[in-house]
Amino acid sequence: MSDFIPKEKNGSAVQTAIDAAHAAGGGRVVLEPGIYLSGTIYLKSNVELHIPAGAKIQGFDTPDKYDDISDPDLVNIAPEGSRKVLLAALHAENIAVTGQGEIDGQGPKFYDTNVPSTSFFAKPPHPRPRMVQFFGCRNVKFEDVSFTDSPGWTFYLLNCEDVHVHRIRVTGCQQMINNDGLDIVSCKRVTVSDSFFRTGDDCLIVRAIRKFPDDHAVCEDVTVTNCVLDSWCQGIRIGCPSDDTIRRCAFSNITFKGRGNGINIDNPVRYLSKKWNDTGFLDLRDLVFTNFVIETERCPIRIYAEKGVKLKYIGGMTFSNFRIRSKQPIKLQGNPETAIDKLRFSEITLETPGSQAIVSEFVRKLDLNQIELISEGKEE
């Protein structure tokens, strides 16, 4: 595989090198140390973008410098009303982003930051770019790179297959809202390992977003292991009520410490798709969570279907070997139309200052084994 070195330190030169490597049938685009100021860069098939230590791709700090990503299959899918992206790939295969360098989105510059230090920045009226958006790609690798201060979602992986994320570092100012860490949406065969995520919004997200009312979307065979999470919102978020099918996902050896919820499977009425008049569509099953340490100011595990939300199925989940300190209890709350089914908790230690350690309502089958609950009986 040949190396292609950009002739100048800017995004246009990086794109020229990517185009040359792609035209040659494949190759590595290797950055030299320095800062590469950039708008949208498109990664193409059979190209590895290598960002070594000392090299940084730094996104412009104004939205007009970024392309609006367009594709016929992306109709109706534009989270936060934005199609702007720093690093994009569309229908590409055999692509990689590697190296011990950095991609910096300059996120705080897109917000009104004149707020107290404990509050989120105010959302601006203009669209904020995402850092990475890959759509319809196969055989994708991210390894070792640091992703810093994305103005929007850091990663948006949509309809991708065979994705490997290894030893990355995602950090964002925690006063930024909607700076998710890794959004895995309608993907198949994804592995995430040995990585660190610190964000204002959710760290890890697994979803199956439908593009149309009769669309069939599946997210399956996702494995996450050996990761450290810190969020003001959620460490792990799975599904929304208007999503389709999420199945066969495993999370292990995870440490979460932060202001937000640890694991949140949240299905409120406000998340239903209003344009389709949904009452709920999600089919969520076969999830395994093993070897977690959670310390949170909120809820360590929350599975929720609000009254008025009617899901296809939610259940078939196992939680084992958890060590928890939290200010709120574990909450398992279905409703008369959507009972949560087949939950198993094993080897759980939970310490909480409140009067309740587990709240359970409309759960069809709950299996508890070796549970130690330490409740001080006083609310903070």
Image (cartoon, helix red, strand yellow):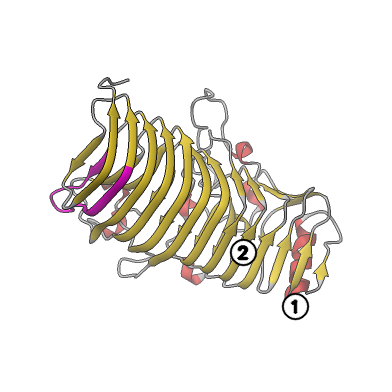
Magenta residues span 330-347
> Is 88 on the left-hand or right-hand side of 290?
right
Q: Amino acid at mark 1?
A: Ala
The quarter holding residue 88 reads bottom right
Quadrant of the rendering where the C terminus is positioned: top left
Q: At 40% across and 66% down in the image, what residue appears?
A: 220
Disc number at residue 141? Answer: 2
Residue at the bottom extreme, as displayed = 25
Q: Is residue 23 magenta?
A: no
* Label 2 neighbour load within 10 Å: few <14, some 14-19, many 20+: some
In terms of depth relative to the viewer, which is nearer, 336 or 285? 285
Disc number at residue 23? Answer: 1
Residue at the left extreme, as displayed = 336
In terms of depth relative to the viewer, which is nearer, 253 or 286? 253
* Main secondary-structure element of the magenta-colored stretch: strand
Q: Amino acid at mark 2?
A: Lys
> Is 56 on the left-hand or right-hand side of 185?
right
Quadrant of the rendering where the N terminus is positioned: bottom right
Q: Position of residue 99 (x, y in %)?
A: 72, 56
> Is 250 on the left-hand or right-hand side of 339?
right
